[in-house]
Image: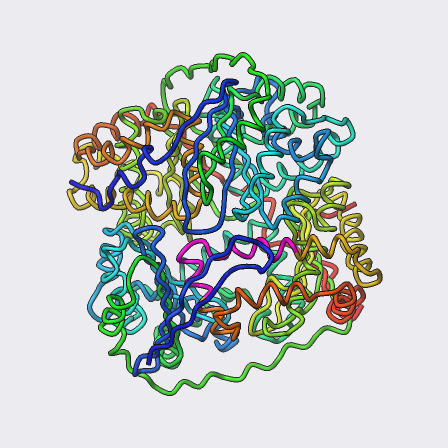
Amino acid sequence: MSLPVDSLAFSADVVRRTVLDNGLTVLTRELHASPIVSAMIWYRVGSRNEEFGQTGKSHFLEHMLFKGTDRFGKGEIDLLTLKNGGNNNAFTSHDFTAYYFNFASDRWEIALDIESDRMVNCVFAAEEFEAEKKVVIEELRMGLDSPWGTLLQELDATAYKVHPYRNPVIGWLQDVERATDSEQQAYYHKHYHPANATLVLTGDFETDRALEKISQRFSPIPRQRDLAQSSTLEPPQRGEKRIKVQWRSKVPRIAIAYHVPEIAHPDSYALQVLNLILTEGKTSRLYQRLVEREQSVTFVTAEYAESKDPTLFHIRAEARGDHSPEEIETIIHKELARISAHGATKQELDRAKHQVGAHFVLSRERAVDQAMLLGQVETLYGLSYIDTYLDRVAAVTSDDLSSVCSRYLSETNRTVGYMVPDGSVDDEVEEGDSEGA
Amino acid sequence: MTKWKKATVKAPDINAGRSFEVISQTLKNGLQVLLVENHTIPAISINATVLAGARYEPEDRAGLAIMVSNILDEGTKTRSSLEIAEAIEFTGGHLETDASFERVVVAATVLKQDRNIGLELVADLLMNPVFPEEYVVKEKSRTLAEIASAKDRPQVVAGWAFNELVYGKHPLHRPSHGYPETIERITREDLLHFHESVFAPNNALLSIVGDFTVDEILPLVERHFGSWVSRPVSLPHVAKPVRQRERREKRIRMAAQQSNVYLGHLGIERTNPDFYPLQVLDTILGAGAGFTARIPQRLRDELGLAYTTFASITGTAGMDPGRFVAYIGTSPENTKLAIDGLLNEVRRIVAEPVLANELQDAKDFLTGSFVFGFESSAQIARFLIQATVYQLGFDFGEKYPRFIRAVTAEDITRVAKQYLDTENYSLVVAGPTED
């Protein structure tokens, strides 16, 4: 089986990897189709690094990095982005925190000024910290108004006993409320330094000149001892776990989480293919069974994302009409049992592999998309992951599918969550209508 | 006849720009085809747009246009639903159907080597859908379930209610997917009739952008779309919505974490020449980079009232007037403070001239970030459609910076007074009861 794309087209060969003396990793990839440069910086810190009672710190820190340094006062990073016609944003996950700027290619160097400065010079004014805490709490509340946000948060906290992936990235409300600026600052100094970061530059620039500029800004930052990344190992699950989450909804929802391996694990490629065969597109097994045949769900989806430590494979669906979560769950188990017993057809395998290959090309059109890929892979594992990725996917067989399905997507390894109506709400109550008031 | 036009996307005062040639050709059946070669990645994007959407559907069949779009890929004269899915999914590409108030869109993105099947499927869905009864029944029931699910999200519920207040009897008052009772009413005959009356090559645009040469793609376009038969299309007249002359208010009680506030009124049409000064106003008031605009700066950064808050009048401008909307999601106890905060900022931009540096920064942002809208083939394909529908011209990239540069502080005050109203507005609050 060959994939529809030349894997060399996106090989790490076209990416230059440079490590500065202070330990900062720099990845550069020239793309000259559009006059745009994306500059991203990735820190190897996320909610997996947070200690007991301190959840949400990595994410809160991401907010504080826009609150000012001595050189760039509060609001100035956004203002410079505005004046230069760019855009910026940031995101935090279990494994990393990343920041990006997109600028036209005649003015991108301002991104280096900002990132090199706020890597070490962020100030934590107490009043700014308290004001931003309110914003973070509003963000947390917004997430709790989403039924899926709430259900998955409870499910993951149940699936893991000890590993920090059990905590929401945004943190538990009680921890966020108690957070202090001094603790936050200590966390910043511990994790934000050159050897714990990767700078990624993609787009319309000239590499040698860009590296010179990068070195000018970042080399003066002293090297700091890189703390060995240690993480708790999750003990194996001994049997099925089940939860019911009561919520103000009339629509039952179901989510199942299975413990599965981390990025680049030999079984991870078969699990990615299995993910596609289960729910990608209308031809997929669970779509055909649950949406088409039984008509018992509005949608069904499986999710398995690359992660540093062993993670969870989720399958979730939203019930419709009179169909119960129990009925939907039974069918999901049956479909998984079929794959465990018989694997997949050649056509299913070929289709999934084509989807992986095409996605690899189609989803990397913009400079920022390539920066995302490179930064994430370097942070989680190393660039070599990209070089072998398509070949490893191409090598997946039907036997591999049945083997990973029976090994990981099993009864003892699963946590099942239902979201059920709490009976509090019939229909929303409308009041205070007024026209011409 | 083939027309060659060179389109440039570049502000005069920046050194970075991108130019591309637009080839516009009208087939014998009246289908206007817009082509741009873009060799960035080995792929092509196809965007076929039928120039009629939910604004033309009868009130008692609200949801019809979206349902038509959702069932287009559930069966054609020669392919079953599963065969269509097999064909596109085997390539690893995407085939999407969607409808808005103005249009129905069939779009595909495929690898270069799959361009023929990509074009063939798009043409088949447009020309030969059969709307199988089985799928009409399924789609109706799925839409009803989705509406029930969407009701769990206070922001969505508040948005629906806001449109009802702002648009009165105009079609945009309703959710584009319709209401449960109108969805129940829709029959297969309604779908066939909608398709028959508005799906025609002379009422459609086709844009294709990506890794091809014009010489090789034109015969493929002719082969797949040339047999689409033209016919007269007459669209019903839609009366203009009337701007409210009084305050309207609705409170919806939901056991949620946050109060969701929508405040605003009728906005402007995309072809309004004041679109550009209003875009500068939006950037200053509620929609700039990061949290630079006044509303996020004040209500989020200074007062800590929200994670999400913004305001915009140009964001929804279309054939019909869009909405001026100021939004905030905040803790229930802060609802009144938040509403006052939104109103204060709107009042301030109406009453006081904007500062010279605010104006300059907003203009620099708009002209400098313009290039980000043209990075991918799918973005360029959408631009070609927009430029045609709203008669922006393919040289829009050259004109746009001039329109923005010309805006003065006096223009901002003039359009603020003319288009923003701090007395006669609609207000929706969805969330827990406030104390």
Please tell me in which quadrant of the rendered image residue A411 appears: top left
Tell me the quadrant of the picture where the C terminus of chain B can be found: top right
Nearest to the observer: residue B385 or residue B411:
B411
Q: Is residue B230 visible?
A: yes
Name which residue lies at 64% across and 68% down. B275
Q: Is residue B132 visible?
A: no
Residue B167 lies left or right of residue B351; in this view the side is left
Please tell me in which quadrant of the rendered image residue A376 appears: top left
Nearest to the observer: residue A43 or residue A265:
A43
Residue B293 lies left or right of residue B202; in this view the side is right
Q: What x and y, as percent, mark residue B362?
A: 68, 55
Tell me the quadrant of the picture where the N terminus of chain B can be found: bottom left
Q: What x and y, as percent, mark residue A369?
A: 43, 43
Name which residue lies at 44% across and 27% down. A379
Q: Is residue A304 above or below residue B17?
A: above
Nearest to the observer: residue B7 or residue A346:
B7
Q: Is residue B91 above or below residue A14?
A: below
Name which residue lies at 43% across and 28% down. A242
User: Which residues fall within the magenta stretch?
Assistant: B364-383
Q: What x and y, as percent, mark residue A398?
A: 17, 35
Q: What x and y, as percent, mark residue A18?
A: 43, 26
Query: In the rendered structure, does residue A188 fall within the stretch colored magenta?
Result: no
Residue B192 lies left or right of residue A232; in this view the side is left
**Colour mode of the rendering:** rainbow
Nearest to the observer: residue B309 or residue A143:
B309
Name which residue lies at 57% across and 28% down. A216
Main SS class of the magenta portion in the image: helix
Count every numbered label the image shows and give the total: 0
Residue A316 lies left or right of residue A190; in this view the side is left
